[in-house]
Amino acid sequence: MGTMTKELPRLVTPVELYREMDRYVIGQERAKKAVAIAAYSHLKRTRARALGTKFSARKSNVLLIGPTGCGKTHVARTLAKMLEVPFVIADATEYTEAGYYGKDVEVMIGELLLAADMDVARAERGIVFVDEVDKIARRSHGAVTGAGSRDIGGEGVQQALLKLLEGRQLFVPTNVTQHWSKHDFVPVDTTDVLFICAGTFSDLHMYSGGTRSMGFNTESGVVRHGRITEKDMLRYGILAEFLGRLPVQVQMSALGEEELLQVLLKPPDSLLREYADLLRMDGVMVRYETSGLKEIVAAALRRETGARGMRAILEDVMSDALFSGPSMSGKTLVVDRDYVSHSLAAAAASE
């Protein structure tokens, strides 16, 4: 099977982790610091295990709560890249309780093993990002109105995930297809696998009893709704044992206009640079005007898709130029407010 990598993981301090994340992740100061501390604990745990020394602190699994496009996945992906560990993204809604048609949770670790090139030791210190955990709440959304439905993807999945989160040896499939044979497995210990779970909890207000509004803040400090508490999540249908395995809980903010503008301008791997590089290969220079970028941000705010939605918007804005790129060689494309408005209107008309 895989080789057993013995090298010690390099310790990177929380300050170093935060500073590097700050280059790529806009805003979300609290989340970046919390994840940096959790990652540092993760590194110390894996290092202690490699040295054969005892490390009594419990695992710092993380729960990120925040709206679509606020950077939950981006934080986890950036962290994994910095730590140089295997990383997988799993959608909690694809998994079902054992015995039902759907993925068993062991497949999640099978995918991590695949990302580690079948190196068990590397997989055992990797990071798993589990998205949509709010969708596996014990109560179906219909239960609020008394309808309800069979809960094969709710409490049962939370229970199945508990063994992964707390850490134990699992028989993990080496073939992550739906029909893997029980003979195609390898034992993997999840004790030092770091889990970062995430969810929007967008309809949490339905379970609050109508006593107060709740939801997300903006980075600008203007409070739109109240903070989400552990009690709220328990009422929503997340098991106490499940929350107990996620000791680091961070509520993230919806990105405002200025933060979304910085998402376009600041990161070394920003979308603006990506499109400019593509067109530069055709001999086309791109000049982004502030008025054009603000129009892109305004479209993202209207769609309420956050940073994630700006790729789709930019694709609409730049599609004509990308299509005509070779014939525009030697020219400069000016992306200003009029260009963005016209492009988005044309894209909407063609749908």
Image (spheres, helix red, strand yellow):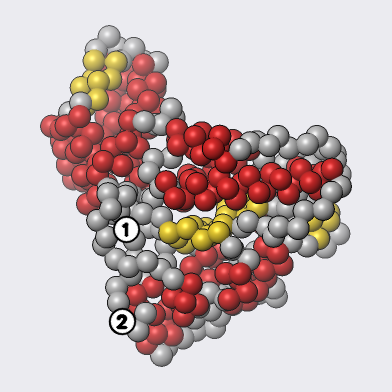
Q: Position of residue 31 (x, y in %)?
A: 46, 50
Badge 2 amino acid:
Thr
Residue 92 visible in the picture: yes
Residue annotated with mark 2 = 211
Residue 105 visible in the picture: no
Badge 1 amino acid:
Asn
Q: Quadrant of the N terminus?
A: top right
Q: Height in image: 327 above or below 23?
A: above
Disc assigned to residue 217: 1
Foreground residue among 283 and 40: 40
Foreground residue among 95 and 61: 61
Disc assigned to residue 231: none
Identify the element where label 1 is drawn: loop
Residue 288 in which image quadrant: top left
Residue sitting at x 40%, y 15%: 281
Residue 223 in which image quadrant: bottom left
Q: Residues within 10 Å of mark 2 (few under 14, many from 20)?
A: few
Q: Height in image: 342 above or below 329?
A: below
Residue sitting at x 38%, y 50%: 69
Task: Answer left or right for 347 relative to 231.
Answer: left
Q: Position of residue 232 (x, y in %)?
A: 44, 75
Residue 158 in which image quadrant: bottom right
Residue sitting at x 44%, y 50%: 30
C-alpha span from label 2 to label 1: 18 Å
Q: Height in image: 23 above or below 144?
A: above
Foreground residue among 134 and 17: 17
